[in-house]
Image (tube, rainbow, N blue to C red):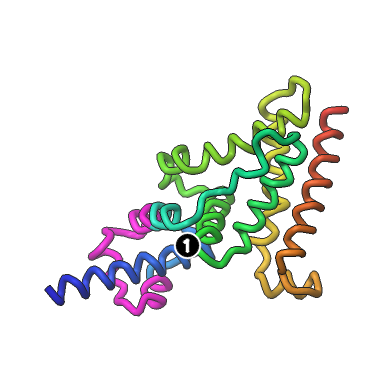
Amino acid sequence: MTRRADGKEKRSRVLDSACEVFSERGYHAATVADICQRAGANVAAVNYYFGDKSTLYVEAWQQTYKQCSRPDSSGVAGNPPEEQLRVYIYSLIKDFSDQGASGQFTRLYLMELANPTGLIHNLWHELIEPRRQVLLEIISKIMGVEVTAETVLFCDMSIVNQCRTLLTIRRSDLEYLLAQPLSTELINRLADHITTFSLAGIKAVVKN
């Protein structure tokens, strides 16, 4: 019984470490050795408990999603699309900077978006597409005219990539560049800036 409990605890440690390492480095840069070292386990533990690195990655996605809080939709429905965009961007930035499960899942999402693995096709459509559709619909409403799906997708990519700054730059480096801590007030100001910048860009696209 004790051996079974120890095995369950070790498996849990490896999975928790995988969630951290994959969200920090992405699938391709993360190594089994990194994950096991952080978990205090032998590298053989991944094969024993999960089969291989790719299966571990899929389970890390599932666990992180279950543990993270769902995006707050309050302040979105019923408001003008411009305000909906601001709320969406704020939620995204807040998730990026979160050090808990919400931040882990958002960083996993962005890592997969930047360097697709092809390992989570089903999970992507189940967990990510609904979230992406919200932003695509907001952008379409702001445009107010008929545009191609490609144009909307380009705007979507532009907005998300502005928010990805919090992922591509280490927190300490970002705070150094901004000369201040990444506080709630700063996140609010950054969200407002990205919203203003994005709205101007969307309007410029419509004029063209």
Residue 9 at x, y = what percent? 27, 72
Q: Quadrant of residue 35?
A: bottom left
Q: Quadrant of residue 152?
A: top right
- Please determine whether, in this image, residue 80 is positioned above or below residue 42: above
- Please determine whether, in this image, residue 38 is positioned above or below residue 80: below
Task: State left or right for residue 103 relative to residue 156.
Answer: left
Quadrant location, the C terminus: top right
Q: Quadrant of residue 159?
A: top right
Residue 3 at x, y = what percent? 15, 75
Residue 14 at x, y = what percent? 34, 69
Q: Which residue is mark 1?
A: 22
Could one spot residue 44 in this view of the protein? no
- Name the residue located 61 percent from the left edge and 59 percent from the top edge: 96
- Name the residue located 51 percent from the left edge and 48 percent from the top edge: 116
- Please determine whether, in this image, residue 185 is positioned above or below residue 154: below
Could one spot residue 153 in this view of the protein? yes
Task: State left or right for residue 199 relative to residue 140.
Answer: right
| Amino acid under disc 1 | Phe
Q: For the stretch drawn in magenta, what is the main secondary structure?
A: helix
* Range drawn in magenta: 33-59
Q: Is residue 54 inside the magenta stretch?
A: yes
- Name the residue located 65 percent from the left edge and 36 percent from the top edge: 77
Quadrant location, the N terminus: bottom left
Task: State left or right for residue 23 relative to residue 195.
Answer: left
Residue 122 at x, y = what percent? 40, 39
Q: Residues within 10 Å of mark 1 (few under 14, many from 20)?
A: many
Q: Secondary structure at mark 1?
A: helix
Among all residues in the image, which is located at the extreme left? 1
